[in-house]
Amino acid sequence: MDLVELLKAALFGLVEGITEWLPISSTGHMLLLGNFVSLNVSEDFWNMFLVVIQLGAILAVCVLFFHQLNPFSPAKSPAERKGTWRLWGQIVVACIPAAVIGIPLDDWMEEHLGSPFVIAAALIVYGIAFILIENARESRPTGAHFAPRKQGGGLAIRPDREARVQSVGELDWPTALGIGAFQVLSLVPGTSRSGSTIIGGLLLGCSRTVAAEFTFYLAIPVMVGASGLRLAKFFFKGNMFTASEFAILGVGCVVAFVVSLLAIRFLMGFVKKHDFKPFGWYRIALGIVVIAYFVLAR
């Protein structure tokens, strides 16, 4: 067993655990890291590893939000259990747009949109979007009513404390589906699955906390489905795990799980007191650095 390869896998797990939940693009960071740190594995395993390592991250959501997501909890009243089933229904409905569009385009996206310049462009564009959205929320007068329509050339967005949806339990079906539609944007590497759904949640009237929390829930079926699809493709090609590959994947998943526990707790605490603009500025700065690096490296 090569200790160096396991340390590399741990590094990828660390990056995955942090960037999967913060709206800064995990896929973009993983692909960029792959340009500097290479695992000594086959191309098929590498393509599978980039996706399946997310299972470690998603397990953190299941652990941290087990009570909220468990419809069989004896501690819940019948009404609360019914509400949990309703939440699961909204999660499934919200995943439909990404499944319908993403599954047929999975191979095409991987082949054509994985370049550093596409990633950098997505980082910058959605970084700007975060800043503009938060500025719009701050500019809304106190007491103004949310109205998802064009006013004065821009989308009317009210401050977080006056957001229409202040808890996940207040989500209606159209809003859940709308957030799921925004998730389709994350098919482009560098966009960020969490970033696109959080932007969708903010634009559709959710508080920052609700937008982030529902984003975590949406990750469960999305990541499990994506990981299952990549594993199926890996084995369908006749591949089998070697002992080394199994260890690499295991280490990556375990580290991603532990780091995700910390990252999720950090983000949920952060958004209660701050907006998303710091992540927007980070995305813009990183996008510029990426473009500069790969232009100079030519």
Image (cartoon, rainbow, N blue to C red):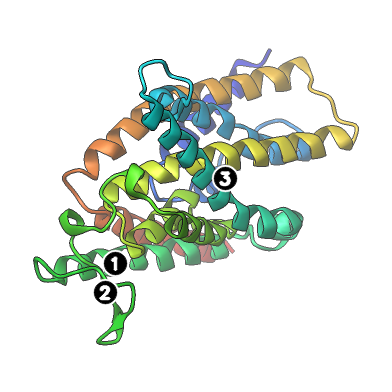
Along the line of sight, which residue is nearer the eye, 198 or 12? Answer: 198
Numbered label tally: 3
Nearer to us of marks 1 and 3 is: 3
User: Which residue in the protein does label 2 denote?
Assistant: 156
Along the line of sight, which residue is nearer the eye, 256 or 167? Answer: 167
Would you say residue 38 is visible in this rendering? no
Please tell me which of labels 2 and 3 falls first in the chain: 3
Left or right of 185? Residue 228 is right
Q: Are marks 2 and 1 in contact (CB under 8 Å)?
A: no
The quadrant of the rendering that contains the C terminus is bottom right
Above-or-below relation of 257 to 2 = below
User: Which residue in the protein does label 3 denote?
Assistant: 92
Density class for disc 1 (Cα within 10 Å; few <14, some 14-19, many ≥20) is many
The x and y percentages for residue 147 are 28, 72
Say which residue appears at 88% left-offset and 36% top-offset: 236
Please tell me which of labels 1 and 3 falls first in the chain: 3
The secondary element bearing badge 2 is classed as loop
Please tell me which of labels 2 and 1 falls first in the chain: 1
Which residue reaches farthest front?
78
Q: Which amino acid, by three-letter code, is at mark 3?
A: Val
User: Which residue in the protein does label 1 denote?
Assistant: 133
Nearer to us of marks 2 and 3 is: 3
Density class for disc 3 (Cα within 10 Å; few <14, some 14-19, many ≥20) is some
Density class for disc 2 (Cα within 10 Å; few <14, some 14-19, many ≥20) is many
- The answer for how far apart the CA atoms under marks 2 and 3 are is 28 Å
Left or right of 227? Residue 210 is left
The secondary element bearing badge 1 is classed as helix
